[in-house]
């Protein structure tokens, strides 16, 4: 039965029929054929209602049939658009080429996999005479930006959905500077995808690439050069060789295992114990509810058990594409402490600066030293920078901003030692202008070994950092909301709190002293009331400063149906009443949830820690 009814239904019908003319993947073809036969407008809407949006994070969606999912045809269409956009921007594209990497994700019912998508993307470029450096095996995401920079290529593509649920996949894009794309490239690429939807003549024939002289495999070269480059951040090889500290590593069924083992070897550290059930790539992520080390202790259950068995004190956990790192340490009490992204950012910032200071021969160079973090991350680096005399800058949320800013600074002859975001992302090595969980893991291991040689734990050193530079207590969480209208309403309410165009003056007992709205560009602290950081109308983000020194930011996520919040209370050095600070922050967060989120009224689902 054909789809009948409104003009909208007819348009869906046409889109599905057009799809069948172009799709040569038998599994997705069969799904769409079946949908048309059943004539269910609701189902067709799910697959053909709207095309995946290409943003600065590229694409991220579930694998499946239709224009709203990741599949062979949408990958071909996306890559055709990207190819045309690059041709327009680079006259030497056919000389320099692009790099393509992939993780281990796969989706049986639609026949999609990261490797298949990467090959189809490679085929698209090669059919147009563009050289492609296609990795022959799975790699960590940071290897793609590394290769762009190292080989001076025009662009890079990484096929990964990072730590998203198993049915998802993604298409992440890097520019010639080795950083993720920022506007207006996303809009230009998006436009080019719209203009290049019909598959080119050889689009489906990916076997052609295997005999093409334009296909190169950078796997061996990058495995050698990357580990050589990160060794520039290795300062205590002798301690590494001698340390008795034991580590457990989990790659959470992703790509990280082999590469973290190699990184430890490069630093002369004994290899970490690998969690056997999680060390090999498995697209089903069978031992975890979410393959995301950010989600709490549930992801680390098997790591804790192995650490207890083997007497390891430190756990290093990568997310499935190994660009993020979570760290846990066994305390004197026998309990495990999982460090927040901000706490590990404080430790790594202190460590990397200390190593630089101890190894820098030019004392004047400090004026050219920079560290960066995103605006929703802890301001601990700012406190360290103020006391030590280097520069600190904050950027918008996401490594695309930090990577691009780092490159600008490096091009001006500055040294960018470190950048981080609270979502357990760390850039510890200037060879990769993105977050990198492999280098972060081994640098954390060297820091822990160095401290252990002085009978100090990571937790003790974190306290020492806070004692010296001031306590920075942070708390972050999120609510899940699948209804964009509710999210819009929630933020509209904050912008019209006591009548039109008025923001809240207080939140429960906490007086609001400043507001910055990066959706509208308003900043009450600036003389002209205009925000300094770039603004974006397409995403929601408001930061409240409170009279007690607290700061809280509410924002929407670019890749998940979440409204996130981040809060921080900073105290000057010497204020050691941490418990009082924590209590004050807890009360502020409770007020924020109650008065600004209103979870009951807005039917928001709380984050539940995975068990």
Image (cartoon, rainbow, N blue to C red):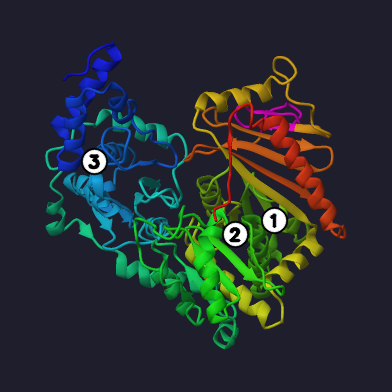
CB contact under 8 Å: marks 2 and 1: yes
Q: In the image, is 119 to the left or to the right of 457?
A: left
Tell me: residue 430, above or below residue 445: above
In reply to whether residue 522 is colored magenta, the answer given is yes
SS of the residue under disc 2 = strand
Q: Position of residue 190 (x, y in %)?
A: 35, 32
Question: Can residue 202 be seen here?
Answer: yes
Residue 381 circle label:
1
- Please give the count of numbered marks on the rendered protein: 3
SS of the residue under disc 1 = helix
State the CA–CA distance, disc 3 to disc 2. 36 Å
CB contact under 8 Å: marks 3 and 1: no
Q: In the image, is 415 to the left or to the right of 21?
A: right
Residue 418 circle label:
2
Q: Which quadrant of the figure has residue 515?
A: top right
Give the residue drawn at x 51%, y 58%: 324
Q: Decide which of 378, 352 is in the foreground and name it.
A: 378
Provide the residue span drawn in magenta: 515-531
Q: Could you classify mark 3 by the number of other residues whose Cα lies within 10 Å: few (under 14), some (14-19), or many (20 or more)?
A: many
Residue 76 circle label:
3
């Amino acid at each position: 039965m054909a789809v009948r009814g409104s003009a909208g239904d007819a348009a869906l019908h046409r889109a599905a029929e057009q799809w069948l003319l172009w799709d040569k993947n038998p599994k997705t073809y069969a799904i769409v054929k079946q949908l048309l036969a059943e004539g269910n407008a609701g189902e067709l809407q799910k697959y053909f209602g709207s095309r995946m949006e290409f943003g600065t994070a590229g694409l991220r969606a579930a694998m499946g049939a239709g224009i709203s999912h990741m599949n062979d045809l949408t990958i071909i269409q996306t890559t055709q658009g990207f190819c045309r956009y690059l041709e327009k921007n680079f006259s030497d594209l056919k000389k320099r080429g692009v790099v393509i990497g992939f993780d281990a994700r796969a989706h049986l019912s639609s026949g999609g996999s990261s490797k298949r998508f990467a090959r189809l993307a490679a085929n698209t470029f090669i059919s147009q005479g563009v050289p492609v450096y296609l990795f022959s095996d799975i790699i960590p995401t940071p290897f793609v930006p590394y290769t762009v920079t190292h080989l001076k290529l025009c662009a890079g593509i990484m096929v990964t959905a990072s730590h998203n649920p198993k049915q998802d996949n993604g298409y992440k894009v890097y520019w010639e500077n080795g950083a993720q794309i920022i506007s207006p490239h996303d809009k230009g690429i998006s436009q080019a995808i719209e203009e290049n939807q019909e598959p080119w003549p050889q689009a489906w024939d990916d076997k052609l690439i295997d005999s093409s002289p334009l296909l190169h495999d950078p796997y061996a070269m990058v495995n050698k050069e990357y580990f050589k480059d990160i060794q520039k951040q290795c300062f205590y090889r002798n301690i590494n060789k001698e340390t008795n500290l034991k580590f457990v590593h989990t790659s959470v069924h992703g790509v990280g295992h082999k590469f973290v083992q190699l990184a430890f070897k490069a630093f002369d550290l004994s290899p970490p114990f690998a969690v056997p059930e999680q060390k090999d790539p498995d697209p089903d992520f069978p031992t975890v509810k979410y393959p995301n080390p950010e989600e709490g202790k549930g992801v680390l259950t098997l790591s804790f058990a192995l650490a207890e068995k083997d007497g390891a004190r430190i756990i290093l956990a990568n997310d499935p594409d190994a660009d993020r790192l979570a760290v846990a340490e066994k305390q004197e009490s026998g309990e495990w402490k999982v460090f927040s992204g901000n706490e590990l950012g404080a430790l790594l910032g202190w460590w990397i600066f200390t190593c630089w200071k101890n190894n820098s021969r030019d004392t004047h160079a400090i004026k050219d030293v920079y560290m960066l973090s995103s605006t929703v991350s802890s301001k601990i680096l700012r406190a360290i920078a103020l006391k030590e005399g280097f520069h600190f800058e904050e950027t918008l949320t996401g490594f695309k901003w930090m990577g691009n800013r780092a490159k600008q600074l490096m091009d001006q002859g500055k040294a960018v030692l470190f950048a981080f975001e609270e979502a357990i992302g760390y850039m510890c090595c200037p060879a990769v202008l993105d977050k990198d969980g492999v280098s972060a893991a081994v640098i954390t291991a060297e820091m822990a070994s160095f401290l252990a040689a002085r009978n100090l734990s990571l937790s003790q050193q974190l306290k020492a950092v806070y004692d010296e530079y001031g306590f920075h207590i942070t708390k972050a969480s999120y609510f899940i909301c699948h209804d964009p209208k509710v999210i819009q309403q929630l933020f509209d309410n904050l912008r019209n709190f006591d009548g039109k165009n008025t923001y809240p003056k207080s939140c429960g007992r906490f007086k609001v002293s400043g507001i910055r709205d990066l959706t509208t560009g308003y900043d009450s602290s600036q003389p002209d009331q205009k925000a300094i950081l770039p603004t974006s109308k397409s995403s929601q983000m408001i930061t409240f400063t409170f009279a007690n020194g607290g700061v809280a930011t509410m924002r929407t996520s670019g890749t998940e149906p979440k409204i996130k919040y981040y809060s921080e209370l900073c105290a000057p050095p010497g204020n050691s009443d941490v418990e009082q600070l924590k209590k004050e922050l807890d009360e502020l967060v409770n007020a924020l949830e109650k008065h600004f989120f209103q979870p009951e009224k807005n039917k928001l689902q709380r984050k539940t820690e995975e068990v």
